[in-house]
Image: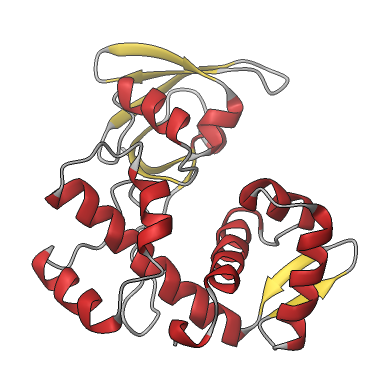
């Protein structure tokens, strides 16, 4: 499926999927920031994607994938997240740097190689950051979780995934032990969108709301 479109189209569809997953819709300003391209380029490309039936663009609202666009995006996401697993599990690279490398790998992996890669990796369900790996049919299976910002004081949970995969953020969260599987407790939430104080193991840490919004947690007793 993905061989029928260019690498640029794949990047756009993948980016729009990630923004939809995070915000419900992909605003053009967010696409500009995510893909590091000029606003004029975004406009032209989105118009092209809409002509090809891959997206729907509602002025002043944003861009959403069509079913056709979503299928392609999920296939790209699948290749991307299995590539990240290859880089961490086989090549033992740090989880903070594999996202950018996987962005380059994902466009060159054929379906045949992908099947063998998935088998070699032991059919992982998530990428190193905890985000679900789509199935070959495009299914998404993951446990329910919510952003840490939605937790109240004294609530406890298990980190399930990190949705923002910027290297600096992942390095920071890794240094605090905030990785998938970590057990945390919210100690304090400052008012007016202030910081959130949490306990990871026996260590107390203070996070900004922006950082905390990228950490998705499953409630525990």
For residue 84, which quarter of the picture?
Answer: bottom left
Front-lying residue, 199 or 34: 34
Inspect this view and state whether residue 67 appears. yes
At x 53%, y 29%, the residue is 211
The image quadrant where one finds the N terminus is bottom left
Residue 194, compared with residue 130, is above or below; it is above
At horizontal 58% and vertical 87% (from top left) the residue drawn is 68
Q: Is residue 135 above or below residue 174?
A: below
Q: Is residue 34 left or right of residue 132?
A: right
User: In the image, residue 166 lies at what x, y percent?
Assistant: 48, 38
User: Percent from the top left, x then y, of residue 79?
Assistant: 35, 68
- Please state the horizontal and vertical placement of residue 95, each as a whole percent of the image: 29, 39
150 relative position to 104: left or right: right
Picture layout, residue 96 above or below residue 49: above
Q: Is residue 126 visible?
A: no
Task: Tell which of 93 and 55 is nearer to you.
Answer: 93
Q: Which residue occupies 82% across, 65% down?
A: 43
Left/right placement of residue 31 relative to residue 159 reads right
Image quadrant in which you'd find residue 77: bottom left
**Which residue occupies the foreground of this view, 44 or 139?**
44
């Amino acid at each position: 499926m993905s061989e029928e479109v260019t690498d640029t189209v794949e990047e756009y569809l993948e980016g729009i999927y990630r923004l939809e997953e995070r915000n419900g819709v992909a605003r053009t300003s967010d696409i500009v920031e995510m893909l590091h391209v000029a606003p004029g380029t975004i406009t032209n490309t989105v118009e092209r994607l809409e002509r090809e039936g891959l997206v729907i663009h509602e002025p002043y609202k944003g861009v959403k994938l069509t079913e056709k666009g979503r299928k392609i995006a999920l296939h790209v996401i699948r290749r991307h997240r299995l590539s990240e697993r290859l880089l961490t599990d086989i090549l033992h690279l740090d989880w903070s740097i594999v996202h950018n490398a996987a962005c380059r790998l994902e466009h060159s992996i054929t379906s045949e190689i992908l099947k063998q890669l998935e088998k070699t990796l032991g059919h992982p369900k998530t990428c190193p950051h905890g985000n679900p790996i789509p199935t070959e049919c495009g299914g998404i299976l993951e446990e329910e979780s919510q952003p840490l910002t939605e937790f109240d004081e004294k609530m406890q949970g298990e980190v399930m995934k990190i949705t923002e995969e910027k290297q600096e953020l992942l390095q920071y969260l890794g240094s605090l032990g905030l990785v998938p599987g970590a057990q945390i407790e919210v100690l304090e939430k400052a008012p007016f969108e202030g910081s959130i104080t949490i306990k990871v193991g026996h260590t107390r840490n203070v996070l900004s709301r922006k950082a905390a919004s990228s950490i998705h947690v499953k409630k525990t007793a």
